[in-house]
C-alpha cells in the first residue's frame, strides 16, 4: 500500500497544486483517506498534516473511513423535489437498510428528467418509487 | 437508410439510450452518437434522415426501423416548434454534430473565431468582446470584455484562463450540455481568451458529479492540443463542494486548498490563481466567444437582447414541466411564455404554483409576476436573479415553507465556513423557520432559571419571529463574503412574502 501511495503522488508530480487530483486517486484506489494516509501525503508534498486534513475534511467526496457497502447517490435538490423525490425517500431508506449506503447529492444536472440517481458512473433518470427502490435493492 | 443518430449526452444515456443503440446495432444499422437537441422529454430521441422519434425504448426499435411507430414520431426534428422558435448561437451545433469529431467541428464553422482572433490580434479581440456586450453567464453578469481587458493590462509573466464548470445549481445543465455536446467550442473560447489576455495555461474546473462531461472534456483537450498550442489546457475535477462554484473558492480549490472564499479585493483578474492575473469565466460565457469573434459576430450579438442584457441566454427548463430541456433565446422572453407555451405547463397537469429562477439561491416567483422579462436588470428590480438561467417549476403541491427551510439547510450544508453570517446565519435561519412553523416556542428549562437575568421572558409573537427572520436575512445579504450566504435570503424571503399561508401566517403578518 505504501508503494501505491507514492506512485499516486509521483503520477501528479508535474502538476501545479496537485493535492486534489492526488486525493481523488487515493480515494478511488485505496477507498479512504485516513489519518496515516494524510500524514504520508503531507510528508511527500512537504505540507503539514493539518493542511492535508483541512482539505480532506472540507470536501464531501473524501472519506476518512472506507465503507465497503455499495453507494447510491440520490439527487434531492429543488428540481428533483419538484418531481417528487422527497415522498420516495422513506421507501428508499427501507429498501437500503444497512446494506446500501444512500447519499444525498445536490444535483446531477439531469433536472428536466428527474428524479435522478447515480451508481458509480451510471446515471439513472425518470425514476418513480418502484424503479428507485429496485435500483437500491440491486446496488 | 441505415444510419440512425442518437445522442450520447448524459440525459439521453440516463433515459436508456444505450439499450436503444444496441437494438439498432443488432438490426445492422450504423449508429451515429451526436449531441442532444435539448428536448429532454423526448429522450432518447432517435433521428433517421432528419425525422425524429421519441421517447424511444428498445422494444420499439424494430417498428422505427420500418418507418412505423407513428405515435412516437415527431416529424422533422429541426422543424419542431421547441427548436424552430429558438435563437441558437452557443448551442448552434446541438443535435447536429458528433461531440468528439474534429471534422464535424471544422465543417460547422469551428475554429473560425480562433483563426480570426489570431489574425486581428489581442487588442481588437478585446474591443470586439466589449462591443458585443457579453456578460458573464455564471450569475453575476459582469461584462466579460472588461474582465479580459483588466487581465490583459495586468502585469505578470504568468496568466491563467480558468473555466468555471462547477455547475452546482439545481435546475441547470447548460454547462454540462456544452461540455458533453460541443466541447471544442469551449476549448476554442478559452484559446481565444488566452490569446487576448496573454495566458499560457487554462484550467477547466469540473464538478465530480458530471462523470460523462469529465471524460468528454479530457478526450477533447487531447484531440485539440495541437490546434490550440502553445496554449495548454487541463481538466481539474472538483470534490463535491457547491461553494467551489464561487470564483475565489474555486481558485483555492484549484491550488489544492480548502475551497474557502477569498475576500475581494484583490480581484482574481489581478491576483487570481497562484497569485497571478486570472480570467475566471463560466462555460457558457467562454462557449459564446467563438461566435462573437467571427466576422461581424460582435455586432450581431450586440443587436440581440434587451437593455443591457445583450445576446442570447441558454435557458434551462426543469422541474415539474411537460417539456423540459434547453431553450436558447435572446433576452426578453417572459416566464409566462417559458412555463406555459414552451414548457407546456406542469408535468403533473396541476396549476403552477411557483418558479425558482437562478438555482438554489434564486427567488421563488409567483404566477402573478410571470410577465417579468428575462433580463438582468428587470430581475434585480423584482428582488430576484437570473443566475445561470435555470428555471425550476413547482405545481400547487409544493410546500413553500419547506422549500424556504431547505434553502437555509442547503446553505448550512454547503457553507465554506469562512464568514459568520453564512456559517451561523443559515443554521439560525433554519431554526427560526421551524419556530414559525411550530407556531412559536416556549422558553426552555435554562431560560426560566432565576439567574438568567438577560433572557427575554415574554414569548415572541409570530410577527416578531418574522421580523427576526427578516433581520437575519438582511445581515446575511449584506454581511456575507460571497453569493452563497448573500443570496440565500432570496428564496427564503420570496417564499415568505408570496406564500405566507404556507408558513401558517396571514398576509398582514408579513410586511411587503
Image (cartoon, coloured by chain):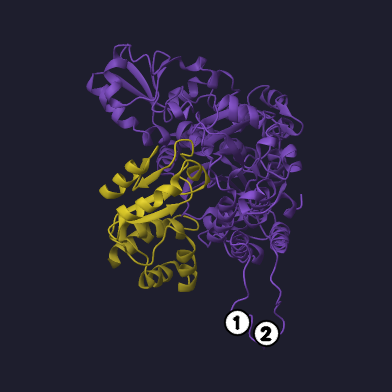
Chain colours: A yellow, B purple
Q: Give the class, few, some or many, for how many residues have Cα within 10 Å of label 1's Cα (few <14, many ≥20).
A: few
Chain of residue at mark 1: B
Q: Which mark is residue B452?
A: 2
Q: How many numbered badges does the structure rendering display?
A: 2
| Label 1–label 2 contact, CB within 8 A | yes
Q: CA distance from mark 1 to mark 2?
A: 8 Å
Q: Give the class, few, some or many, for how many residues have Cα within 10 Å of label 2's Cα (few <14, many ≥20).
A: few
Q: Nearer the viewer, residue B446 or B390?
A: B446
Question: What residue appears at the point 73 percent right and 24 percent down from the top-left corner?
Answer: B303
Chain of residue at mark 2: B
- Specify whether residue A114 is in view: yes
- Specify whether residue B158 is in view: no
Q: Measuring from the top left, give residue B38's x and y in whole percent.
A: 49, 28
Left or right: residue B340 compared with residue A138 = right
| Secondary structure type for disc 2 | loop
Q: Measuring from the top left, give residue B386's x and y in whole percent.
A: 65, 40
Name above or below for residue B213 compared with residue B47.
Answer: below
Image quadrant where residue B189 sits: top right
Left or right: residue B211 compared with residue B391 = left
| Secondary structure type for disc 1 | loop
- Work out whether mark 1 precedes mark 2 in sequence or the reverse, and give the earlier one: 1
Q: Quadrant of the N terminus of chain B?
A: top left
Left or right: residue A38 compared with residue B323 = left
Q: Measuring from the top left, give residue B65's x and y in whole percent.
A: 29, 15
Residue named by callout 1: B446
Q: Nearer the viewer, residue B363 or B150?
A: B363
Name above or below for residue B240 compared with residue B345.
Answer: below
Left or right: residue B361 compared with residue A90 = right
Q: Measuring from the top left, give residue A54's x and y in whole percent.
A: 49, 68
Q: Nearer the viewer, residue B373 or B341?
A: B341
Amino acid at each position: 500500500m505504501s508503494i501505491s501511495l507514492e506512485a499516486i503522488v509521483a503520477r501528479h508530480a508535474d502538476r501545479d497544486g496537485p493535492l486534489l487530483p492526488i486525493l481523488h486517486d487515493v480515494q478511488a484506489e485505496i477507498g479512504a483517506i485516513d489519518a496515516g494516509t494524510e500524514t504520508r501525503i503531507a510528508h511527500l508534498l512537504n505540507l503539514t498534516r493539518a493542511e492535508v486534513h483541512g482539505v480532506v475534511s472540507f470536501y464531501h467526496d473524501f472519506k476518512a473511513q472506507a465503507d465497503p457497502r455499495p453507494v447510491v447517490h440520490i439527487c434531492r435538490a429543488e428540481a428533483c423535489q419538484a418531481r417528487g423525490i422527497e415522498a420516495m425517500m422513506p421507501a428508499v431508506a427501507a429498501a437500503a437498510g444497512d446494506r446500501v449506503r444512500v447519499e444525498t447529492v445536490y444535483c446531477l444536472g439531469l433536472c428536466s428528467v428527474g428524479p435522478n440517481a447515480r451508481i458509480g458512473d451510471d446515471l439513472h433518470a425518470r425514476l418513480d418509487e418502484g424503479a428507485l427502490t429496485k435500483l437500491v435493492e440491486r446496488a | 437508410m441505415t444510419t440512425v443518430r442518437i445522442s450520447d449526452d448524459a440525459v439521453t444515456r440516463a433515459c436508456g439510450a444505450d439499450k436503444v443503440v444496441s437494438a439498432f446495432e443488432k438490426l445492422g444499422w450504423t449508429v451515429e452518437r451526436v449531441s442532444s437537441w435539448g428536448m429532454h422529454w423526448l429522450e432518447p430521441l432517435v433521428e433517421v434522415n432528419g425525422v425524429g422519434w421519441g421517447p424511444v425504448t428498445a422494444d420499439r426499435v424494430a417498428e422505427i426501423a420500418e418507418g412505423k411507430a407513428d405515435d412516437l414520431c415527431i416529424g422533422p426534428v429541426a422543424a419542431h416548434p421547441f427548436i424552430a422558435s429558438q435563437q441558437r448561437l452557443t448551442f448552434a451545433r446541438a443535435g447536429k454534430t458528433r461531440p468528439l469529431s474534429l471534422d464535424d467541428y471544422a465543417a460547422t464553422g469551428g475554429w473560425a473565431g480562433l483563426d480570426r482572433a489570431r489574425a486581428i490580434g489581442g487588442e481588437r479581440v478585446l474591443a470586439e468582446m466589449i462591443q458585443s456586450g457579453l456578460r458573464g453567464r455564471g450569475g453575476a453578469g459582469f461584462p466579460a470584455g472588461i474582465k479580459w481587458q483588466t487581465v490583459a493590462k495586468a502585469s505578470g509573466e504568468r496568466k491563467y484562463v480558468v473555466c468555471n464548470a462547477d455547475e452546482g445549481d439545481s435546475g441547470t445543465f447548460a454547462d454540462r450540455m456544452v461540455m458533453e455536446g460541443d466541447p471544442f467550442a469551449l476549448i476554442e473560447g478559452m484559446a481565444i481568451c488566452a490569446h487576448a489576455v496573454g495566458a499560457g495555461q487554462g484550467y477547466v474546473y469540473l464538478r465530480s458529479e458530471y462523470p460523462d462531461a469529465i471524460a468528454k472534456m479530457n478526450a477533447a483537450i487531447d484531440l485539440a492540443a495541437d490546434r490550440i498550442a502553445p496554449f495548454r489546457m487541463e481538466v481539474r475535477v472538483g470534490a463535491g463542494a457547491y461553494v467551489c462554484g464561487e470564483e475565489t473558492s474555486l481558485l483555492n480549490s484549484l491550488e489544492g486548498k480548502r475551497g474557502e472564499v477569498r475576500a475581494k479585493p484583490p480581484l482574481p483578474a489581478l491576483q487570481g490563481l497562484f497569485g497571478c492575473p486570472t480570467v475566471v469565466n463560466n462555460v457558457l460565457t467562454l462557449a459564446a466567444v467563438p461566435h462573437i469573434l467571427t466576422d461581424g459576430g460582435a455586432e450581431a450579438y450586440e443587436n440581440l437582447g434587451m437593455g443591457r442584457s445583450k445576446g442570447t441566454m441558454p435557458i434551462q427548463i426543469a422541474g415539474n414541466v411537460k417539456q423540459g430541456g434547453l431553450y436558447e433565446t435572446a433576452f426578453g422572453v417572459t416566464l409566462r411564455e417559458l412555463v406555459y407555451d414552451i414548457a407546456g405547463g406542469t408535468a403533473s397537469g396541476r396549476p403552477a404554483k411557483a418558479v425558482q429562477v437562478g438555482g438554489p439561491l434564486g427567488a421563488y416567483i409567483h404566477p402573478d409576476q410571470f410577465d417579468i422579462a428575462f433580463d438582468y436588470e428587470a430581475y434585480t428590480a423584482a428582488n430576484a436573479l437570473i443566475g445561470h438561467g435555470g428555471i425550476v417549476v413547482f405545481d400547487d403541491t409544493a410546500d413553500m415553507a419547506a422549500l424556504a427551510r431547505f434553502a437555509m439547510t442547503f446553505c448550512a450544508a454547503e457553507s465554506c465556513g469562512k464568514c459568520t453570517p453564512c456559517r451561523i446565519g443559515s443554521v439560525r435561519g433554519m431554526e427560526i423557520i421551524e419556530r414559525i412553523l411550530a407556531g412559536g416556542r416556549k422558553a426552555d428549562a435554562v431560560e426560566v432559571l432565576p439567574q438568567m437575568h438577560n433572557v427575554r421572558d415574554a414569548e415572541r409573537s409570530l410577527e416578531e419571529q418574522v421580523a427576526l427572520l427578516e433581520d437575519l436575512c438582511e445581515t446575511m445579504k449584506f454581511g456575507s463574503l460571497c453569493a452563497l450566504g448573500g443570496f440565500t435570503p432570496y428564496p427564503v424571503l420570496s417564499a415568505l412574502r408570496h406564500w405566507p399561508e404556507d408558513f401558517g401566517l396571514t398576509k398582514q403578518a408579513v410586511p411587503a
